[in-house]
Image (spheres, grey):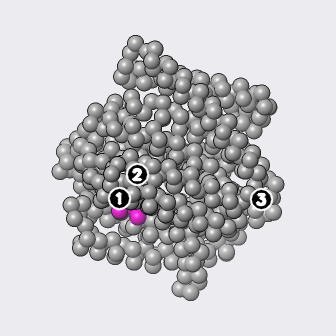
Amino acid sequence: MSTRKNALYNVAYRVFSVFLPLVTAPYLSRVVGTEGMGLYSYAWNISHMFVLLGLLGLESYGVRAIARVRHDQQALNRTFSEIWRMQLAVSGATLLVWLGYVAFVAREEQTIALHLTMMSLSCLVNLDWCLMGLDQFKPITLRNTAVKLLAAAAVFIFVRGPEDLWIYAFAWSLATLVGCLSCWTSLRGKIKLVPVTWKAAFSHLKPCAVLFVSVLAISIFRSMDKVMVGALSTMEQNGYYENAEKIIFCLSGFITAIGTVMLPKVSAMFKRGEVDRVRTHLDTSMQLIMCMVCALSFGVAAVAIDFAPLFFGEAFAFSGVLMIPLAFTLIGMGFANVVRTQWILPQGKDHIFVTSVVTGAVINLISNALLIPPFGAAGAVVGTLLAEFTLPAVHWFYLRKELPHARLFRHALTYAALGLVMLLAVRFTDALLPVEGWLGLAIQVLAGCAVYGASCLLLWRKTNNKALLQLIPGMRK
């Protein structure tokens, strides 16, 4: 399957994974309130950290390992069998620890946590890493989309008040498990389990664990933010932060999708020695990602104040304030993702990846500990911003002699300038509008899209940027 089709399927998969909870958010926010949203967020994010432990970095290591041997059937069968055996051992142990947490540690979130158990159970059968390594993104997208649509329907039908939060947890937890199980059929005829020793299986543990350190660190400044807000401030503040971050997380799915598609492709290029081709891909990808994330960052910042109370309800108006600075984390995420998935991980330079995210996590933890008690959710926003921009800074330090960072930074600054023009145009439009509400918001969004789109098109024509112009229908030569 072509890279373009894989990107489309993976964008759909990543965005749908967070888009459906976003669809239910306006209804859920009004039904369970700020404290209910904060409580669920607290329980879910603790559950999510156990899921990350159960998968132990396989979304990076497993994809890369399978991509490297996918053209050698014997090596493919052996590698898959070894990694999955290790996965069963690690995920099984993690599941037991999760059950211990639910039984003996959980407090007011215990009921919700119990109904999230299938999240940890799904780690035993999650083979997305294998399908991605084989460039099989279509089955992941279609099957997960179907089960999550059913879960969303269940929320609207059965959740009627704060006492029904456990139904919300159960529906999404079950959807995750069913989605993982349903993808097994896609591996028939493509891969075969073969006998392997425990020694061979656990030979993957160390490199996988190295990447897990980075996954855990990323979790600290993604999931741990909400855990710390709930623990150091109030569940109400956590509710504000949950909804603000939910919008940003949804938009970051576009970044993750492109990076996930490119990782196996670039890994194969490096194995064939096509370094110059990789550099070309990286430069084009950086332009595309910066174009996209600057549009999203400045666009969200421009409409956040109007959007939050309309979408989540007046009780969540403060979420709009938090969304403004949070939106700019997308720029740091995008820059770091391109370098990580198209240079660092394909070459096995895992120590750079680990160092960057651990440094970001430490900075985030310190910032959260200092700022959340006096400032609540706003303190967590500052920590997240610092963490996300730490990653590209560390990448630059290690790779400053390998990559043309001046050119890459110039791409970011160019599209940030266009994004600022769009933001000013949107705010000017808002000031002139005689209408408010959804109609006014729609007009602002259309004005922003028109200004940004026209600016990008003029830039690409002036610089004769064939790589990006050919992505536009009717301009391919």
Please, is residue 352 above or below residue 225 in the view?
below
CB of mark 1 within 8 Å of CB of mark 2?
yes
Q: Classify mark 2: residues with Cα within 10 Å, few (<14), some (14-19) or many (20+).
A: many
What's the magenta region? 44-49
Residue 125 rendering spot, x and y as whole percentages:
45, 67
Task: Specify which label sits upstream in the sequence, 1 or 2.
Answer: 1
In the image, which disc is placed on residue 401? 3
Q: Is residue 70 left or right of residue 324?
A: right
| Mark 1–mark 2 distance (CA, rounded to whole Å) | 8 Å
Q: Secondary structure at mark 3?
A: loop
- Residue type indicated by callout 1: Met
In the image, which disc is placed on residue 283? none
In the image, which disc is placed on residue 380? 2
Q: Secondary structure at mark 2?
A: helix
Q: Classify mark 1: residues with Cα within 10 Å, few (<14), some (14-19) or many (20+).
A: many
Residue 84 rendering spot, x and y as whole percentages:
52, 73
Residue 65 drawn in magenta: no
Q: Is residue 406 left or right of residue 252?
A: right
- Residue type indicated by callout 2: Ala
Task: Specify which label sits upstream in the sequence, 1 or 3.
Answer: 1
Residue 349 rendering spot, x and y as whole percentages:
67, 67
Task: Specify which label sits upstream in the sequence, 3 or 2.
Answer: 2
Q: Which residue is mark 1?
A: 228
Residue at 65% over, 24% down? 454
Residue 48 drawn in magenta: yes
